[in-house]
Structures are given as structure tokens and as C-alpha cells.
Amino acid sequence: MIEVYTDAASQGNPGPSGIGIYIKSGQQQMEEYLFIGDYSNHEAEFIAVIKALELCNERFPDEIISFRSDAKVVVDAIEKKYVKNNIFQSYLNQINQLSSSFPYFFIKWIPEKQNKHADELARKALQLNN
């Protein structure tokens, strides 16, 4: 099973945003961070999940994927397959499409303190804008 931690950081809401992705596969660990431009914090959190799913599709296409995020809005939307805010609908559609290719896909909300590694990566991505 692949464990995936995602987070986003934004300066302003909306504002310059970065995402962090931390992946654990047994003893193997992978880190990705990316400056993504100007987004709201919630949009950036959705984009972090999308980018992580794309990475997993490339590198672990047949694995069980377990995501963790401290973004309650994103986790709830994915679990319920529903968003109240129409702005997020296209992100949810992409996530549903990407996640459907895995044998099993799980997502779980975790407190911020358990997501420090992905948070550090997202903040590192923000610095790429400077």
C-alpha cells in the first residue's frame, strides 16, 4: 500500500500557492513540491491531490493508494463525491476519474500536526515564486 500525504500553502486567499506531496512506499520515500500560481487555499488543496494522483498513476498504477490530507473540505468532498461550491466541481471530477484507475483508493483527514512533511514541502514550493 502506498501512503500519500498532500498539503497546500497560499499567500493570500486567493494568492500565490504551492503544493507539497510526500509519498511512502515501504522503505522508499518520495517528495514533490510545485509552485502552481494564484489560487484559493481550497483550490490549491484539491490541486495537490490531483497532482499526487497523477504521480501515483505514473509510478504505482496497480497499487492500493491511501491518501491523507488536513484539508477537511477536500476530504469530505471526495468521500461524499459532492461539493457545495461549483468552483470545486471540476477538481472533484478529475480526482474521481484519476482515482478510479486504482484497485483501491482511500482518503483520510488527519490533523495538521500529522501532516508536517507535506506542509514543509508546500511552503518550500511557495519560495520558488520569489
Image: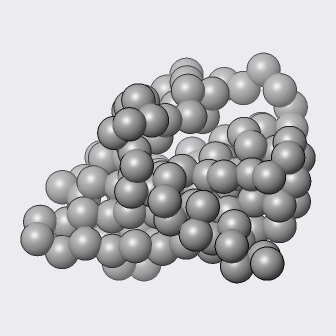
Q: Where in the figure is residue 83, as x and y percent of width and height?
A: 72, 26
Q: Where in the figure is residue 69, as x and y percent of width and height?
A: 46, 40
**Above or below, 129 relative to 25:** below
Q: Is residue 53 visible?
A: no
Q: Where in the figure is residue 16, as x and y percent of width and height?
A: 83, 61
Q: Nearer the viewer, residue 76 or 95?
A: 76
Residue that protrudes farthest toward the left in the picture: 27
Q: Residue at x 42, y 78 (%)?
A: 58
Give the position of the C terminus as an image quadrant.
bottom right
Q: Is residue 125 left or right of residue 79?
A: right
**Above or below, 68 relative to 123:** above
Q: Where in the figure is residue 116, as x and y percent of width and height?
A: 40, 49
Q: Nearer the viewer, residue 84 or 69?
A: 69
Q: Residue at x 25, y 72 (%)?
A: 29
Q: Is residue 112 visible?
A: yes
Q: Quadrant of residue 24?
A: bottom left
Q: Is residue 49 left or right of residue 118?
A: right
Q: Residue at x 77, y 38 (%)?
A: 89
Q: Quadrant of residue 114?
A: top left
Give the position of the N terminus as an image quadrant.
bottom left
**Above or below, 4 relative to 24:** above
**Above or below, 44 relative to 23:** above
Q: Nearer the viewer, residue 63 or 15?
A: 15
Q: Is residue 50 left or right of residue 5?
A: right
